[in-house]
């Protein structure tokens, strides 16, 4: 039974013939060999590698857990313990191979580590697979699990001995796995994945209401916007030495990388089908969508300008004009990409968040910002 469950989850994430796993492994191998043979060597602290391994893996695990990939599988007969461990192990393999593996390929190619440090990196990633799963499954005790995770992060930060870290994280991983042994599979089905907002018969669909409802039911989208506001607060520190705010437009380009807002149509195939099939929906959807993205972009840019004023003493009227123009251009670019080049064929929402398409608009804005800097 476990073998069939593993195969079902693996095919859902890696493709019917596991082609995605093979392609990703080949990419990691090419990246590692290319960087290693290039002779480039950097000194990277083992602590930084441990932290990167844990942070990247935990972030991806939380995203795939929130994606609700489990919900269709729950309709099949299953053994609780086998189901949970199959689900977590396949998600962990996905996170480690498709995301953490690429990070490891780059880091270990330019900064060779000894076997103990590689083992600690692996056990940190293993704990980063298990801890989000424990946090997600223990809905009534998330406060305690969160404190546990914070304590584990503190151990990673302050304990400098790699051998002790290996022992501590190995024991912690065993304990976390023991807790998952008693987890209920239905706890891994997030409410957001089964929640639906309906519109009464004859009631006009208000796109703005849809956007706000969508964001409030997907808190990770709001968290990403809050993170961009945090980046906007610290970004002026790096531009403070630029004369007359010459790099301010570059800041607007960097802050346009708000991935969730750029895939609102791609992540909801049912909405896309309705928008494309119903008459008059092109204007009814694209205009409010563009204004919504523009509003969020302008909010983040406003935070950036306020932080820039506090840290550097002020900015000119041209900076405020650039904020409006770049927010508008970013919104137009996102809407055009979503309408003419939607992302299809993705397996889970994490694929959308990390799709290379998200860099097209920021790179375009960065080119414009560079041209503006040259003219000024």
Image: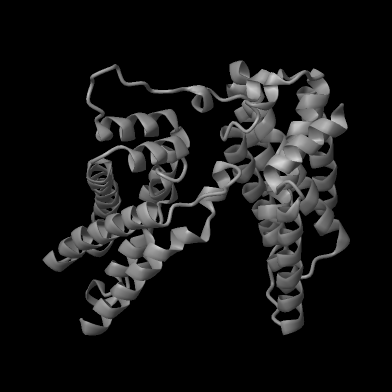
* Residue 242 in picture, x, y percent from top left: 30, 75
Task: Kindly indicate the quadrant of the structure image that contains residue 341.
Answer: bottom left
| 356, 320: nearer the viewer | 356
- Please indicate whether residue 185 sits to the left or right of residue 220 in the image: right
Colour treatment of the image? one colour
- Please indicate whether residue 326 sits to the left or right of residue 55 in the image: left
* Residue 158 in picture, x, y percent from top left: 68, 47
Q: Is residue 345 above or below residue 364?
A: above
Task: Kindly indicate the quadrant of the structure image that contains residue 225.
Answer: top left
- Please indicate whether residue 344 sits to the left or right of residue 82 in the image: left
**Residue visible at 26% across and 28% down?**
205
- Please indicate whether residue 159 sits to the left or right of residue 218 in the image: right
Q: Is residue 303 above or below residue 80?
A: below
Q: Looking at the rendering, in which quadrant would you find the N terminus?
A: top right
| 12, 309: nearer the viewer | 12
Q: Looking at the rendering, in which quadrant would you find the C terminus?
A: bottom left
Q: Is residue 246 above or below residue 276?
A: below
Q: Is residue 223 above or below residue 83?
A: below
Instruction: Tell me if residue 160 can be seen.
Output: yes
* Residue 340 in picture, x, y percent from top left: 37, 56
């Amino acid at each position: 039974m476990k073998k069939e469950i593993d195969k079902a989850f693996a095919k859902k994430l890696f493709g019917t013939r596991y082609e995605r796993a093979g392609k990703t492994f080949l990419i990691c191998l090419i990246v590692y060999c290319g960087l290693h043979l290039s002779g480039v060597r950097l000194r990277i602290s083992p602590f930084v590698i441990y932290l990167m391994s844990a942070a990247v893996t935990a972030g991806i695990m939380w995203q795939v857990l929130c994606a609700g990939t489990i919900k269709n599988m729950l309709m099949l007969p299953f053994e609780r313990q086998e189901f949970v461990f199959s689900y977590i192990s396949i998600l962990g393999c996905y996170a480690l191979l498709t995301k953490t593996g690429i990070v490891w390929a780059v880091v270990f190619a330019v900064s060779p580590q000894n076997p103990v440090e590689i083992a600690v990196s692996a056990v940190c990633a293993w704990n980063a697979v298990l801890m989000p799963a424990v946090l997600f499954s223990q809905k009534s005790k998330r406060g305690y699990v969160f404190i546990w995770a914070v304590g584990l992060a503190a151990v990673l930060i302050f304990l400098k001995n790699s051998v002790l870290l290996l022992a501590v994280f190995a024991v912690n991983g065993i304990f976390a796995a023991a807790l998952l042994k008693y987890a209920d599979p239905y706890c891994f089905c997030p409410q957001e994945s089964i929640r639906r907002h309906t519109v009464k018969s004859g009631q006009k669909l208000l796109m703005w209401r849809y956007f706000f409802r969508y964001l409030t039911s997907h808190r990770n989208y709001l968290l990403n916007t809050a993170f961009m506001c945090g980046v906007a607060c610290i970004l002026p520190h790096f531009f403070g030495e630029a004369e007359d705010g010459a790099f301010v437009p570059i800041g607007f380009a960097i802050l346009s990388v708000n991935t969730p807002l750029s895939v609102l149509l791609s992540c909801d195939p049912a909405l896309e089908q309705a928008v494309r099939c119903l008459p008059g929906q092109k204007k009814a959807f694209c205009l409010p969508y563009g204004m919504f993205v523009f509003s969020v972009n302008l909010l983040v840019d406003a935070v950036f300008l306020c932080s820039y004023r506090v840290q550097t003493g002020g900015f000119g009227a041209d900076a405020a004009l650039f904020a409006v123009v770049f927010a508008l251009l970013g919104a137009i670019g996102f809407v055009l990409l979503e309408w003419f080049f939607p992302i299809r064929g993705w397996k889970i929402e994490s694929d959308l968040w990390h799709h290379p398409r998200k860099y097209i608009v920021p790179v375009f804005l960065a080119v414009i910002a560079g041209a503006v800097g040259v003219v000024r």
